[in-house]
Image: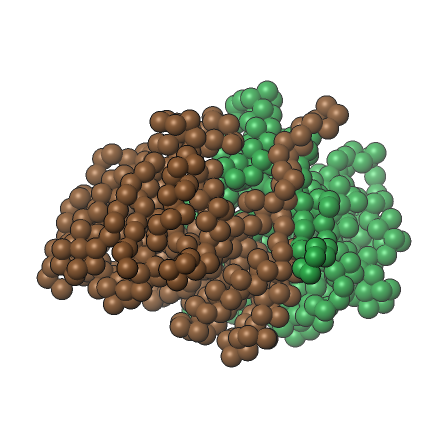
Chain colours: A green, B brown
């Protein structure tokens, strides 16, 4: 079976971190005989600049065909004044929606070498390893009606939170499946005390649990309490499953706890394709960081670890993914630090390129 | 002018913390000549148990007439299985909506004596003093259509996020007014990159700023980035203004940063009444904590400081509010600690009642 990859570097630091991922991909081809058919295209502001749209139909079609899409980042102040319908983010949202990538896996892991880098106390976050499963194709991100309408003399802004039973059920299954291979615990978060969509969410998650995963420990928490508990004692969690909007905030919060935002990858998975592989898009959790773009300051690790997730979830190469993750741990243990990782305890400063090269060297050595 | 107060202790620890507030109210009457006409009534599960509804029309009418409502807390596992329409929370939400309390002021302040108690590093939170202004009468909490409907074989959960221009404008004004008396900085948070209601929110806040408060420093942040920045470096903020749902999560997150959840009050303010005083409800940020209810373990300070906010915002007694706040600081500096405040550094353990008595004694001494 050939392995096909579509690379969409996007905006800001996207292209420069993706250049480092290319080195890793090449290494796996040359040294491990795992080869990829790679194509590259534009998304976000970069696509808008060239085509007047943040994602062309041709790129969308290509994304539907490949085994995995690897995305850098989208957005930037340059595009702030654009109409809502052509903002860079719409390109990413279209990919998520049309590929039907309903399960967004966001590990929040605290790397031991970086534990002191968190704004939280070391003992609160050291060893942290939680997985947030965020629903990614529905909810208020996509619900209709939406827009800004005129009512009398006033503008009114409207969005619709909408979840069907089957949308909730499928992402709940993803969470339970993951939990079985981890700590066997799922905490589901919503606002069932205030929102009917939250009531349905809670009910369906409970039903799927009782019928299909009774052996997994399930709890429910209101999302505001969830934000509190993530801040107070994040290690109480194993897998968290939540909707698109709550997942957006809570996964960013969880990412920040680790102190290693530049380190965190994500996978967005859909249903299996004809070849058995799931529709998949991989991207770092961090944004496009326009303020440091093009300066060799960006940390490529989140994007490299996103490729590791691709190895694991799209190409069934769990051992090779672990090999890559070990190489990353090695360079960190060796004290190599991009600017974002440079804490009071110091370290050996490296550029974006330096970090990529060091990881390739660690792969060679390992 | 008489001062009228409606006390709604509610559920869980509500009644016992409110009993301590009563001591404070009595002290102000006896020692400072500031007297209150106090009535008391039921809300939440307590009201449901007696009347089959979490808020009777009679209580609602009384709340509309008084100068200020003081609420303890609502909710508890006993009521989890109740129908959505009679859940304890609906009582509180009805008060907010019918009194039109659009500006929810949630100070997140880190008390010096308790800075080590946060899960965040001391230097990240020591001296923290931010004010979150949360819109409280609209958004997804109240938008129509809402409910769980049947579509084909499936249940579908629906809620509507909806904001009018004037709803955004009035809460923005509250935030700018507060900022002028504080650090002169407002950060507005939404998801304008994903939600049209967020686009309108951002535009209206900017318009009010430019037309009426050009001297206040205004910035905008996506709510997910806001959750990150609150965790990473909360002291960058002065006043944060945001919608009902984001405000729910972000204010709880901010509260937890301080490590002093049992210490944090809130004020919910509406338009001025005939006597010039705003419609107002004051309540602690913490919940009903059913697990420790009735054991004398609860910390009454959040509720007592909510009464201090009432002195300041409803009764124009800023100096007396400061007097009460100083008494609270005094007992903390003396090392008095309810169970929730008992950190590794120890302290003198006191009960709910002991804390209330100590604050009265500090008022006497001060
Ligand atoms: C860029 C933006 C549209 C996106 C989102 O809100 O989902 C981002 O914040 C994320 O979490 O991936
Ligand atoms: C009790 C609940 C309805 C309420 C809310 O969601 O607003 C609470 O969490 C709060 O923040 O005051």
Q: Going by the picture, which residue comes out furthest to the left?
A: B365
Quarter-wise, where is residue A204 in the image?
top right
Viewer-nearest residue: A170 or B104: B104
Q: Is residue A103 visible?
A: no
Relative to residue A210, is residue B131 drawn left or right?
left
Is residue A82 positioned above or below A323 on the image?
below
Q: Going by the picture, which residue comes out furthest to the bottom?
A: B215
Is residue A246 positioned above or below A27 on the image?
above
Residue at 13%, 55% (x, y): give it.
B30
Question: Could you say where residue A359 lies in the image, as x and y percent from the top left?
Answer: 63, 59
Residue at 62%, 48% (x, y): give it.
B161
Residue at 79%, 66% (x, y): give it.
A46
Is residue B34 positioned above or below A78 on the image?
above
Is residue A219 positioned above or below B219 on the image?
above
Q: Going by the picture, which residue comes out furthest to the top?
A: A211
Quarter-wise, where is residue A301 in the image?
bottom right
Quarter-wise, where is residue A322 in the image?
top right
Q: What count of labels does the image hold?
A: 0
Question: Could you say where residue B108 lies in the image, as x and y percent from the top left?
Answer: 38, 59
Viewer-nearest residue: B181 or A328: B181
Viewer-nearest residue: A6 or A26: A6
Residue at 89%, 53% (x, y): give it.
A58
Which quarter of the rendering shows the C terminus of chain B? bottom left
Question: Could you say where residue B233 lies in the image, as x and y percent from the top left?
Answer: 45, 65
Viewer-nearest residue: B253 or A352: B253
Q: Is residue B15 visible?
A: yes
Relative to residue B362, is residue A205 drawn left or right?
right
Question: Could you say where residue B337 lies in the image, as x and y percent from the top left?
Answer: 20, 50
Q: Going by the picture, which residue comes out furthest to the right?
A: A58
Which quarter of the rendering shows the N terminus of chain B? bottom left
């Amino acid at each position: 079976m050939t392995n096909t990859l579509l690379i969409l570097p996007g905006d800001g630091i996207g292209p420069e971190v993706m250049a480092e991922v290319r080195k890793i991909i090449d290494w796996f081809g040359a040294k491990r005989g795992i080869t990829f058919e790679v194509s590259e295209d534009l998304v976000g502001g970069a696509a808008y600049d060239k085509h007047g749209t943040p994602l062309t139909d041709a790129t969308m079609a290509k994304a539907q065909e490949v085994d995995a899409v690897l995305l850098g980042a989208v957005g930037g102040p340059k595009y702030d004044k654009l109409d809502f319908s052509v903002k860079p983010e719409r390109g990413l949202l279209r990919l998520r929606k049309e590929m039907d990538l309903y399960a967004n896996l966001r590990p929040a892991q605290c790397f031991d070498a970086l534990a002191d880098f968190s704004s939280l106390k070391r003992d609160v976050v050291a060893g942290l390893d939680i997985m947030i499963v965020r629903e990614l194709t529905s909810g208020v991100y996509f619900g209709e009606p939406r827009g800004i309408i005129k009512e009398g003399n006033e503008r009114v802004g409207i969005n619709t939170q909408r979840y069907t039973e089957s949308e909730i059920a499928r992402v709940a299954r993803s969470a339970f499946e993951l939990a079985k291979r981890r700590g066997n615990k799922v905490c589901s978060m919503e606002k069932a005390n205030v929102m009917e969509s939250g009531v349905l969410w809670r009910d369906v998650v409970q039903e799927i649990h009782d019928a299909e995963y009774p052996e997994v420990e399930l709890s429910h928490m209101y999302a505001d309490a969830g934000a509190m508990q993530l801040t107070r004692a994040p290690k109480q969690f194993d897998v968290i499953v939540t909707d698109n909007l709550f997942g957006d905030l809570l996964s960013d919060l969880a990412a920040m706890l680790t102190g290693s935002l530049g380190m965190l990858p994500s996978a967005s998975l859909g249903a299996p394709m004809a070849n058995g592989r799931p529709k998949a898009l991989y991207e770092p959790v961090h944004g496009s960081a326009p303020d440091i773009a093009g300066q060799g300051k960006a940390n490529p690790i989140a994007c490299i670890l996103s490729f590791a997730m691709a190895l694991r979830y799209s190409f069934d190469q769990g051992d090779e993914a672990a090999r890559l993750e070990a190489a990353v741990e090695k360079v960190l243990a060796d004290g190599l630090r991009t600017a974002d990782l440079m804490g009071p305890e110091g370290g050996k400063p490296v550029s974006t390129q330096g970090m990529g090269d060091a990881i390739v060297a660690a792969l060679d050595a390992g």
